[in-house]
Image: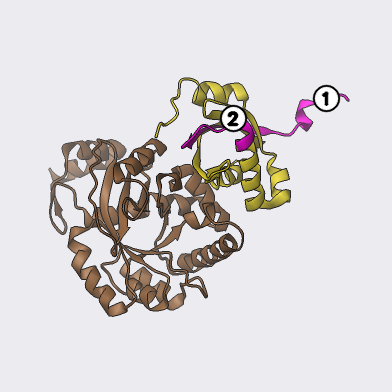
Chain colours: A yellow, B brown
Amino acid sequence: MKILPPTLRDKKRYLAFELICEHDVTREELIREMFSCVGSLIGDIGSSECGIRILTFEDSKGIIRCAHTKTEQTRAAVATITHIGGGGKRAVVHILGISGTVAGATEKYLEGTEVFTL
Amino acid sequence: MARLQFYDLNVHSIPDGKNPSPEMAALAKHFGYAGIAITNHSNTEYKPSGFESNDFEVFKGIEIVSTNASKLHGLIGKYRNSMDVLVVHGGNEDINRAAVENRNVDILAHPQTPKDSGLNHVLAKSASENDVAIEFNLDAIFKGRGGRRVHALSHFRKNVEIARKFDVPMIITSNAASRFDLRAPREMLALAGLFGMDKDEAVSALSTVPAGIIARNKPSSGFIRQGVEVIDIDDMDCDMNSEPDNETKETGGSN
């Protein structure tokens, strides 16, 4: 299928985040927990409007993509993450900054930043 | 514009919470707070903090727990002078009422009772007159799930509406019992937006309201008595730079 022209594409924002957790967390565990939290706070309809997706996640840092008008709602939803994975591992997601491009978010907020060590 | 200074004035450390206060403070500082208040419940043992930093302050606080209004007033009198932040553990109709009627109380924490939001027009008027801030403990939203969270959200929404009408100071706190219960200031503002607080209200509930509470209880080093204060020369410079025209006019007039 032909790709949409730029004016018709959904506008996105990219949230750079760090994960502060007692143990190492896999990408799958984070994704599962995030969708469960987002779904619980804003429901299926809200989730689909937010269009949240985890793009990259390594070394406890990563990028979340969301719709450009829903950054505050996404922030709130992500802030409701308290545990990740089995065994009740405590965790906090801290949003480092928001950018209009993946490259911008990576350069400004992720490169060279040290994740807080407990 | 100067960068806003954010404060979280209801944080619990060991033995009330899970972590010692320096650990709580380290994470709060990393999140960008200018300070936190350790407000352990009055029925647990108090341990002072040992966290020192140039641009981060840990305030001494207490969350007073009592089931009896007259005992509450006694405890408030007992702790007032030694504490920077005095919080009352709300959640009971009599206690809520006693707290908002006492000028020495800084914050009424989680006033919501099992029945309702814990705030009405009578309490709101008293809180406004006595400058008692109503707390919105956001841990109810980010930690709660299901029915409990639904109730918390609707009580908070109601309290925002009442507080707005009667001009009651509102304050946002994490009520953290572990360092994983802390949230960064921007996340706190986003969570406050979920129950109808607008952006300006939320920002002031996390910065100017707590800063005001600290300022009135912890006078600056130059404080002499009510209305008399030695001002630092650096502060003077800031004022002059912000309004250079007025400053020169005034000196000209006095000469």
Q: Is residue B36 left or right of residue A109?
A: left
Q: Who is closer to the viewer here, B24 or B105?
A: B24
Instruction: Look at mark 1 in the image and give the residue it sits on.
Output: A3
- Note whether B44 is above or below B166 in the view shown: above
For the residue marked with disc 2, what is the amino acid?
Ile
Magenta stretch encompasses residue A101: no
Quarter assignment of residue B127:
bottom left
Q: Residue furthest front?
A: A87
- Note whether B216 is above or below B252 in the view shown: below
Which residue is at 73% across, 50% downward?
Answer: A45
Element type at marker 2?
Answer: strand
**Whole-percent x and y of residue B102?**
29, 72
Q: Who is closer to the viewer here, B221 or A94?
A: A94
Which residue is at 58% across, 42% downward?
Answer: A86
For the residue marked with disc 1, what is the amino acid?
Ile
Instruction: Look at mark 2 in the image and give the residue it sits on.
Output: A63
